[in-house]
Amino acid sequence: MRTKEHPIVIVRRTKAGHGGHHGGAWKVADADFVTAMMAFFLVMWLSAQDSRIREAIAGYFAEPGLMPHERSNSMLDSGRGGIDPSGMTVLNRQSQALQEAEQKALATAAERIREETKAREFASLRDQVELSVTAEGLRIELVERNGSSFFDSGSAVLRGESVKILSVIAREIGKLQNDVVIEGHTDSRQYSNGERYGNWELSSDRANAARRVMLVEGLRGGQLRAVRGFADNDLRVPDQPLDPRNRRVSIVVRSQSAAQLESAIRQGLVGTVAPNIAP
């Protein structure tokens, strides 16, 4: 007897929609987490920046079309994208106050040196002692002139009056806490026998001669940071290389800000930028 053949039925099950750990919801959560971390690190970076950088960035986001040096249409009087420039941090105010106090102390020392060198015993050289307070600190220049020199001609031997002037300078700047650098400079006149002794040696020897007197007369050993000889590579009158005013000894009482900046540059921590010191 012949049996009926039953049709073969093939059931193909389709996969259900994505779910469980095979789904894509985790990608959204991960993206949110990464975004939050980026925002967190951005905030941390901004909080560590200088106030001027923060003001410039805030001003840009307030009005993206403006550069930091342009004025904005902000409703605030500052006109800098909603940042009030008078809102300096306490740290910045303290730093500025210290700089101003230091500049005042250097100016006072310069005035005392001027007063003491007005004495009759300094009559022949006092007009050749030039003092100026700049961003680098107090610069004292002992400048030579025709027929009037602090040293014997062509040598590093100090004359008697020069020693007394250096003593006055040493006593005054020895009262300060600032570092001191002594520099020697010459004109471009060459020695007849420059192979054995030339302007490099002379400029260094004159700076060292000034150093020896000043250390005896009141300059503290810890104050002295460097003694440098420049020969004729830093002329005071560049267009007249033989001018006697190019022959000089420079005593630089460095401001603490300038000294710190130089140290940071030497260590590669910052670029070569001028210190922000009030005039």
Image (tube, rainbow, N blue to C red):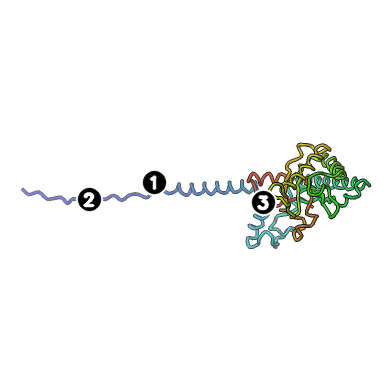
Q: Residues within 10 Å of mark 2 (few under 14, many from 20)?
A: few
Q: Residues within 10 Å of mark 1 (few under 14, many from 20)?
A: few
Residue type pointed to by label 1? His
Q: Residues within 10 Å of mark 3 (few under 14, many from 20)?
A: few
Q: Which residue is mark 1?
A: 22
Q: Nearer the viewer, residue 165 or 194?
A: 194
Residue type pointed to by label 2? Ile
Residue in the image at 83% along x and 38% along y = 218
Q: Nearer the viewer, residue 158 or 93?
A: 158
Residue 9 is situated, as x and y percent measured from the top left of the image, at 21, 50
Give the distance between the C-alpha atoms of the residues marked 2 and 1, in whole angstroms.
28 Å
Residue type pointed to by label 3? Thr
Q: Nearer the viewer, residue 135 or 50?
A: 135
Q: Earlier in the sequence, mark 3 or mark 1?
A: 1
Q: Nearer the viewer, residue 246 or 100?
A: 246
Q: Which residue is mark 3?
A: 272
Give the distance between the C-alpha atoms of the residues marked 3 and 1, in whole angstroms.
56 Å
Q: Nearer the viewer, mark 3 or mark 1?
A: 3
Q: Is residue 20 left or right of residue 68?
A: left
Q: Earlier in the sequence, mark 2 or mark 3?
A: 2
Q: Is residue 32 left or right of residue 2?
A: right
Q: Which residue is mark 2?
A: 10
Residue with the most extreme front position: 192
Secondary structure under the numbered disc 1 in the rendered image: helix
Q: Quadrant of residue 260?
A: top right
Q: Are marks 3 and 1 in contact (CB under 8 Å)?
A: no
Residue in the image at 53% along x and 49% along y = 35
Secondary structure under the numbered disc 3 in the rendered image: loop
Residue with the most extreme left position: 1
Marker disc for residue 159: none
